Image: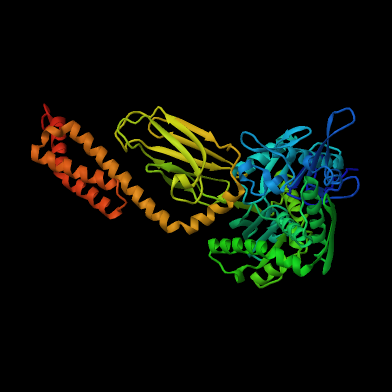
């Protein structure tokens, strides 16, 4: 009698071929790990049955003076007594330096600037955000391996859609340090859409409103024939529930006419404020109390007061929502559904504001803390090859444009923002001067027209270009972005085949405020930028015209008489003068006059070239 091998729904018939893959939501406040079991995605619990792991790490010394770590709930247990060594909300420090931390003075840490990224001084030494994040990821990896009693094949790790290249690379570094094989970095809003099974709903446009502890994301996803496409994305990577906690803590201290003097005071009042905020999600009033060095803090807070304090922050999220809708060129009533993600969306004030804006109650069926991890778990199961259906395809997008510097300090966009990834786009460029044998490639990120207003990602040089006349070389620059949003750039001279490339592993340090403001600046300065770009382009054209004329005069100036030479010199002088002015029309007119004034000279040069080419040759040979 033959045996029949059965399998779980959507999984390989051979259990030995099943690869164990997990999805990890590395959050500001909480982190979770999820996987598909018995055909259903679920968050994996710890030994006490808790699926949430607080994103907190405490470094301490044992009785022998050796350093050890407490992670998660164990770390939070003593955070009020040992705030300097208990690191929470570390996600907000990823890719940032001390100068970028606007609220550094209100935090109980001793920071130290290090090359690339700020560090936190602890009893175990200076710890970078990457190291702290790796501790959290390693704990979740161990939880998953204990659950399955086996090693992991890989993990999908979620990041805010607004994380830039540096922050994504930092997340990958932390995962590698934790011993994880990263299958993909997945934008948090996209993960939420997967968890909600939007692929099973009617086709249309859906909004993902993700307000977590430290970041806010808003994404518009178009569902069409099982394909998720991120139409537009935006947000603020320095805005979240932590800011509401700070506002509530400051208001409580002001009401009680007290101050949080010591680091212990600052942490204690923040812990109390968070507890009150959570209680007010279900109750009409709550009591905020904690012991400070100056006495007992005790105040009563109503839900209305919390709404008043949080309104400016909620309004900031709606500003980002409006911007994304404007990018997508749609009205709020076109959106078919709004998915709420992140613990902060439990607040009635947030749900009411979002519901009023879109004119419909938001979707809150799933636990907002778990929804991102569940979606990542489903995606990890697919990428591991355990789901043969391939139910849905994900098309994330770039949040900011990528390009390179051209003459005049201008940015030529190669990949515009909101382009689906992975993608590869190329553009041809040429040399500016005769005999040019090298080309400097400067890779940039941002929405402005000028180099100085965009973020520099990388520089490299293409050398070995064969000497040719200006404009004769053909240099193809290719930008390739992988599924994780990481960039590689290649420059190749088409005639000779010489090539140079760079993989952009950016230095950490772009402030979250800079990332969030790049689009705002792009909108507010668009008209002025375009005028400035036109002027710079005219200057580049003028310089090119002057360079070409000088070269021609050096080679064939003897064709001109003194009067003709003086006229051309005068025209060149006017172009040079106009280059220093800010008058676009005057510069264009001077350049046009030089072009017209040298037409006869160009014709003489052409005739000489033809005579030289035909010298000594018969008609038959020609």
Q: Nearer the viewer, residue 497 or 601?
A: 601
Residue at 73% over, 67% down: 307
Which is nearer the eye, 412 or 130? Answer: 130
Task: Work out whether 484 lies above or below 65.
Answer: below
Q: Is residue 296 visible?
A: yes
Asked if residue 35 shows in the view, the reply is no
The picture quadrant where one finds residue 229 is bottom right
Question: What x and y, as percent, mark residue 423?
Answer: 55, 46
Q: Position of residue 246 (x, y in %)?
A: 73, 55
Q: Position of residue 203 (x, y in %)?
A: 64, 65
Quarter of the image that includes the C terminus? top left
The residue depicted at 21 percent of the width and 43 percent of the height is 573
**Quadrant of the rendered image containing residue 461:** top left
Dividing the image into 4 quarters, which one contains the N terminus? Answer: top right
Query: What residue appears at the point 37 percent right and 55 percent down from the top-left corner?
Result: 531
Q: Report x, y in % for residue 403.
A: 48, 45
The number of callouts visible is: 0
């Amino acid at each position: 009698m033959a045996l029949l091998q059965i399998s779980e729904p959507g999984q390989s018939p051979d259990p030995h071929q099943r690869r164990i893959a997990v999805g990890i939501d590395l959050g500001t406040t909480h982190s979770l790990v999820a996987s598909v079991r018995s055909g259903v995605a679920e968050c994996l619990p710890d030994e006490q049955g808790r699926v949430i792991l607080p994103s907190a790490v405490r470094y301490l010394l044992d009785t022998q003076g050796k350093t050890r770590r407490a992670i998660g709930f164990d770390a939070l247990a003593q955070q009020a007594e040992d705030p300097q060594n208990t690191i929470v909300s570390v996600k907000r420090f990823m890719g940032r330096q001390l100068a970028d931390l606007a609220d550094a003075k209100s935090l109980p840490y001793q920071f130290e600037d290090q090359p690339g990224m700020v560090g936190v001084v602890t009893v175990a030494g200076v710890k970078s955000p990457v190291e702290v994040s790796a501790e959290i990821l390693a704990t979740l990896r161990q939880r998953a391996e204990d659950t399955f009693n086996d090693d992991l094949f890989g993990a999908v790790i979620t990041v805010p859609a607004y994380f830039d290249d540096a922050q994504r690379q930092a997340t990958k570094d932390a995962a590698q340090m934790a011993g994880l094989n990263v299958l993909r970095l997945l934008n948090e809003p996209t993960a939420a859409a997967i968890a909600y099974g939007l692929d099973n709903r009617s086709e249309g446009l859906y909004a993902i409103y993700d307000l977590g502890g430290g970041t806010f994301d808003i994404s518009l996803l178009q569902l069409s024939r099982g394909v998720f496409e991120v139409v537009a994305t935006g947000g603020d990577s320095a805005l979240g529930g932590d800011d509401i906690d700070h506002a509530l803590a400051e208001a409580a201290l002001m009401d009680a006419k007290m101050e949080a003097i010591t680091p212990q005071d600052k942490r204690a009042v923040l812990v109390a404020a968070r507890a009150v905020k959570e209680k007010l999600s279900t109750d009409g009033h709550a009591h905020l109390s904690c012991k400070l060095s100056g006495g007992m803090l005790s105040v009563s807070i109503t839900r209305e007061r919390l709404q008043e304090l949080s309104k400016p922050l909620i309004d900031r999220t709606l500003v980002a929502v409006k911007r994304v809708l404007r990018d997508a060129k749609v009205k709020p009533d076109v959106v078919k559904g709004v998915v709420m993600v992140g613990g902060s969306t439990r607040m009635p004030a947030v749900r009411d504001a979002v519901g009023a804006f879109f004119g419909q109650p938001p979707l809150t069926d799933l636990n907002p803390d778990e929804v991102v991890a569940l979606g990542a778990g489903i995606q990890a199961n697919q990428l591991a090859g355990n789901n043969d259906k391939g139910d849905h395809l994900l098309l994330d997008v770039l949040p900011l444009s990528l390009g390179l510097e051209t003459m005049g300090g201008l940015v030529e966009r190669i990949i515009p923002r909101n382009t689906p990834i992975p993608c590869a786009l190329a553009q041809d460029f040429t040399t500016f001067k005769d005999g040019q044998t090298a080309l400097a490639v400067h890779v940039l990120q941002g929405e402005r027209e000028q180099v100085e207003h965009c973020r520099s990602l990388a520089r490299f040089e293409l050398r070995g270009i064969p000497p040719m006349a200006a404009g004769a070389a053909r240099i193809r620059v290719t930008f390739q972005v992988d599924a994780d949003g990481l960039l590689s750039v290649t420059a190749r001279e088409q005639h000779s085949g010489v090539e140079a490339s760079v993989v952009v592993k950016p230095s950490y340090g772009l402030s979250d405020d800079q990332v969030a403001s790049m689009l705002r600046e792009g909108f507010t300065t668009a008209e002025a930028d375009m005028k400035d770009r036109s002027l710079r382009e005219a200057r580049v054209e003028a310089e090119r015209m002057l360079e070409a004329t000088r070269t021609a005069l050096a080679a064939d100036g003897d064709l001109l008489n003194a009067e003709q030479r003086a006229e051309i010199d005068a025209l060149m002088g006017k172009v040079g003068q106009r280059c220093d002015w800010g008058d676009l029309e005057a510069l264009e007119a001077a350049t046009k006059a030089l072009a017209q004034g040298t037409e006869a000279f160009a014709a003489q040069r052409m005739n000489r070239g033809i005579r030289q080419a035909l010298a000594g040759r018969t008609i038959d040979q020609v």
